[in-house]
Image (cartoon, rainbow, N blue to C red):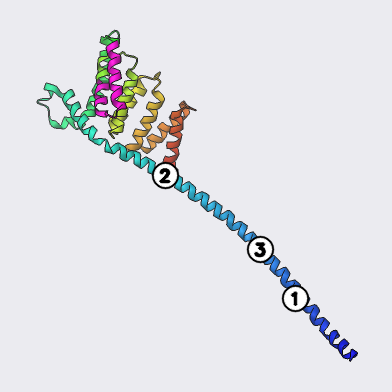
Amino acid sequence: MAGAIASAMLFAYPAFAQDSRLSLADRVTRLEQQAQSRDQGGTGLVNQIQQLSDQMRQLQGQVEELQHQLQVLNDKNKAQYADLDARLARLEGGGAGNTGRPQAQAVNPAAATTATLASSQPAAAASSGGVADPVAAQAAYDTAFQSIRAGNYVAASREFRSFIQQYPNHALVPNAWYWLGQSYFVTTNYAVALDAFKHLVAQYPQSDKLPDALLKVGYCQIELKQTAAAKATLKQVIAKYPGSDSASLAQERLQRLQLQSGS
């Protein structure tokens, strides 16, 4: 009986050892699979983080574009002022001398008024040795500035034009040119705004408003689809006025332009 049991155990031992080896192999395989799964999981996590980062950048670009579109819409809502301003400019610049002239010459009265104002200013300055009435000049400027602060851009443009004409030698004339351009820019009359800002840049290189005016030149060029010129202008702002708010805004707008154009 004891011999039979011993024989059985003798024959069973290889089978038991084989099962142990197979079990150990299975365990090793399982551990390898788990390690591989962890590696794959880590790689997958990295990929997910990268995808989320890409999506965040895309969303940020979309938000910036939506903000720009919202600003454009807000500006266009004020376009009703531009029409009234054009009519006022036609009345102010026309007078009796326009009676026999063709209507086609008044295609853009605001632009004509701004150009006439710029060309006549040196003559007015030459004929006036100084500011005739500093108190009245300051009051006129303050009235125009209050109008633009209140959002009454039609009145502001009219009052700033009047100020420039009446007081061509006043120290605030460069500022008046800037706000005149701004009143046209806000009412989406970008071509006329561009002329005003360019006049300030060209005629008053020492003005404190020069960085902002040059920046607005770039903004006008963007709205007029003059993309290459706009990029050059914005780069000029960044190079000439590093560290300024104007340079920061120019850098931000330039990056958006480059993203949109892919260059």
* First of labels 3, 1 by sequence position: 1
Q: Position of residue 150 (x, y in %)?
A: 29, 28
Q: Which mark is residue 22?
A: 1
Q: Residue at x 28, y 15 (%)?
A: 139
Name the residue carrying label 3: 36
The answer to whether marks 3 and 1 mark residues whose Cβ atoms lie closer than 8 Å is no
Q: Which mark is residue 63?
A: 2
Task: Tell me the distance, in whole angstroms, between the alpha carbons under discs 3 and 2.
Answer: 40 Å
Task: Tell me the distance, in whole angstroms, between the alpha carbons under discs 2 and 1.
Answer: 60 Å
Amino acid bearing label 1: Leu
Q: Position of residue 10 (x, y in %)?
A: 86, 85
Circle 3 — which element? helix
Residue 175 sits above or below residue 189 on the image: above
Residues packed near mark 1 inside 10 Å, few (<14), some (14 to 19) or many (20 plus): few
Q: Residue at x 30, y 26 (%)?
A: 148
Q: Position of residue 102 (x, y in %)?
A: 12, 30
Q: Please say whether residue 250 is visible from this viewpoint.
A: yes
Q: Position of residue 177 (x, y in %)?
A: 31, 22
Residues packed near mark 2 inside 10 Å, few (<14), some (14 to 19) or many (20 plus): few
Q: Nearer the viewer, residue 129 or 123?
A: 129
Circle 2 — which element? helix
On whether residue 141 falls in the magenta region, the answer is: yes
**Magenta: predominant secondary structure element?**
helix
Circle 1 — which element? helix
**Where are the magenta residues, as a range?**
135-161
* Quadrant including the C terminus: top left
Q: Is residue 48 left or right of residue 174?
A: right
* Snapshot quadrant of residue 201: top left
Q: Please say whether residue 168 is visible from this viewpoint.
A: no
On whether residue 60 falls in the magenta region, the answer is: no
